[in-house]
Image (spheres, rainbow, N blue to C red):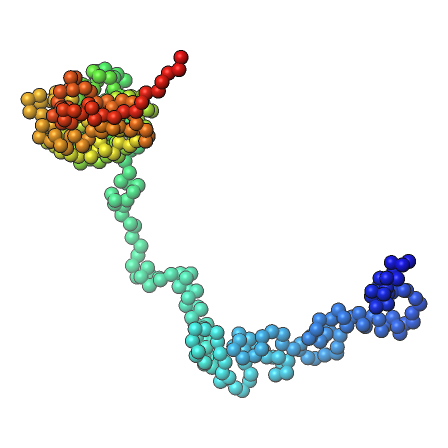
Amino acid sequence: MIMDTMDLRRCQWVARRETETVKTKDEIHKQFHQQKAKQAPKGRKNFRHHDHRGQRPPQIGPPMGNSRGAAIGIRSSGQNRGWGPPRGNSTTSFAIRSNTQDVRPNTEVRKFLKQDSNSSQNSRRFGNRQDSARSPRTPVAQTASSPRMARGPSKKDLKEKFKKDVLCGENKNLDDKKVDKWLQTATEGNYAVFFEYFLTASSACQAQLLVNVRDANRSKKVNHKTLIAWARKFAPTLNDFASEQDTPKAAEYFGRSLSEFVHTGSVPIQVLVNLCSTIKEDDEARNKFMMGLLKSLLELNEESPQIFDNLDVIAKGFCLEPKKFGKPCRRSSIPASEDFPVLTKILGEDYEKRIKLGASPVRKR
């Protein structure tokens, strides 16, 4: 009771809820019109509840002038009671929203806009048919430069063909004529299949394949540019190939397979030294590559091998502080001077002292 009195005082003695009492019809009608007036929006008269028979509703929208409604001739109910331009005066000026301030008669601009829209729609729909109507369509001839025609067999298909044509299911005895025929096809795919098979073959099979490479090179049946292009792509992936094929000496065999081309002068030794530097994340593999190259060059010509004319170039191919994946290697794969005396002329008399290796882990008992 006390709380209600305090609320009533706070609301200026106006009750929160109106007490319902008996009302007359006049009071009910008056209350209805008051509620209707409160619900009606401000600034707009209620057109529906007034008698406007035979008249159009007034225009609701932007004012007349520089607007689209003025351009197409929309008028309110007070002018001629219709749509379109006013009769008897066709030169009514107006403004059109555009990048220019041009003002023209309504009829002229309407014709221009209609022609422009029709021409743009036709050009988009049909394109330029003048040339196509005069000259009939001719089929485009496929050239050898198209990617579909230039694409050769895949590496997987070449491997299957190599097994079928060259290996004949036997890895020990190979047909020399078939091997020579395979090397004469100077493509990167053929060289990739041949030399990758060489890296995984047995020692006896490698000796036979080296004879075939020697004969093909000295009879000028090998494309050296294509061969070096393949070797540059293969060298960065040599470590992955060795781990997949379980061939620890793959880098040494790779240098051995290319020594024939340096011996005959077909490929400069500087090219192979630069190729050796592209072997990634394993300096020990670089040393193996250089040792395979040197051993084969000495076997081909013991009296005057190519290495003595390029000692400085060959020395750049070796790494005396080998690292593997950023960590020092435990082995350098560089033989001692007693086992390979030629290295003293290439790397110096004290090259063994300058080799730095990582510490071997201590085994716990």
Q: Tell me which residue sits at (33%, 63%) in the image.
A: 130
In this rendering, the count of numbered labels is 0
Q: In this view, does 232 lie to the left or right of 82?
A: left
Question: In which image quadrant can residue 151 be found?
Answer: top left
Instruction: Using residue 206 as the reference point, say whether residue 38 is left or right of it.
Output: right
Picture quadrant of residue 252: top left
Q: Position of residue 280 (x, y in %)?
A: 29, 32
In the displayed orientation, state which residue is furthest to the left. Answer: 303
Residue under the image location 68 percent in, 75 percent down? 43
Residue 101 located left or right of residue 79: left
Q: Which of 132 and 253 is in front in this view?
A: 253
Residue found at x 30% / y 50%: 139
Q: Residue furthest right?
A: 22
Above or below 283: residue 75: below
**Does residue 173 sit above or below 125 in this rendering?**
above
Q: Name the image quarter holding the C terminus.
A: top left
Counting from the top left corner in percent of width and height, residue 172 is at 23, 15
Is residue 89 among the parts visible in the rendering?
yes
Viewer-closest of 40 and 251: 251
Quadrant containing the N terminus in the rendered view: bottom right
Viewer-proximal residue, 213 or 87?
213
Q: Image quarter for residue 27?
A: bottom right
In the depicted view, which residue is nearer to us: 202 or 75?
A: 202
Q: Where is residue 272 in the image (x, y as percent from the top left)?
A: 18, 32
**Place of residue 126 in the rendered image (x, y in percent of width and height, measured from the top left):** 40, 61
| Any part of residue 161 in sight | no
Q: Residue furthest top?
A: 365
- Asked if residue 254 is positioned above or below residue 44 in the image, the reply reads above
